[in-house]
Amino acid sequence: MIRHITLKSHARTEFIDITGDVRELVKQAGIKNGVIHLFILHTTAAITVNEGADPAVQRDINGFLSKLVPNDPYFTHSEGNSDAHIKSSLVGTSQTLLVDGGKLVLGTWQAVYFCEFDGPRERKVAVRIAADD
């Protein structure tokens, strides 16, 4: 069964910590061991696992991506958001995480981030949880 995480972004570009939402879905599924697949249902957003303790890391990543792929007026896509499409492709639209002992497996400093590159918008993350047992 596919579940969804629905969220609202508040800026054109931002990283939104969805770790708590992912943990809650694992808890609701009631599985002991398995995997959780997260897939972004948009072409101008992405998902990543990265530093969760210091928000400066998200600012640095976002700043670097904006320098790497600026919102260039010479892009030919008529909606004016080609930079967001490129950033989505660079970061990626899916993550697969492990579940062990009923808990999401993340490193000490890791968090799961929805990456908004063309907000503010309402967004959805499709989630599939597969149990080993």
Image: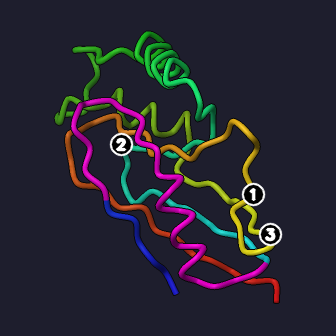
Bounds of the magenta segment: 7-32
Identified by mark 1, the residue type is Val
- Pointer 1 and pointer 2: residues touching (CB < 8 Å)? no
Q: Residues within 10 Å of mark 2 (few under 14, many from 20)?
A: many
| C-alpha distance separating marks 1 and 3 | 6 Å
Q: Residue at x 63, y 31 (%)?
A: 51
Distance from label 1 to label 2 (Cα)?
A: 27 Å
Q: Nearer the viewer, mark 1 or mark 2?
A: 1
Q: Earlier in the sequence, mark 1 or mark 3?
A: 3
In this view, the mark in front (2 or 3) = 3
Q: Amino acid at mark 3?
A: Asp
User: Considering depth in this image, is 24 or 35 the residue closer to the camera?
Assistant: 24
| Residue at image mark 2 | 44
| Nearer to the camera, 91 or 108 | 108
Quadrant housing the C terminus: bottom right
Q: Which mark is residue 105?
A: 1
**Label 2 vs 3, first from the N-terminus:** 2
Instruction: Please say whether residue 31 is one of the residues in the magenta stretch.
Output: yes
Q: Position of residue 60 (x, y in %)?
A: 51, 15
Residue at figure coordinates x 50%, y 14% from the top left: 64
Residue drawn at x 52%, y 46% is 47
Task: Assess whether residue 90 is covered by the magenta stretch.
Answer: no
Secondary structure beneath disc 3? strand
Are there few (<14), some (14-19), or many (20+) residues within 10 Å of tag 3?
A: some
| Quarter of the view holding residue 120 | top left
| Three-letter code for the amino acid on which mark 2 is drawn | Thr
Q: Residue at x 40, y 41 (%)?
A: 16
Mark 3 lies on residue: 100
Q: Position of residue 104 (x, y in %)?
A: 69, 62
Q: Do the CB atoms of the residues marked 1 and 3 lie less than 8 Å apart?
A: yes
Residue 122, x across and y down, in percent: 23, 54
Pointer 1 local density, CA inside 10 Å: few below 14, some 14–19, many at least 20: some
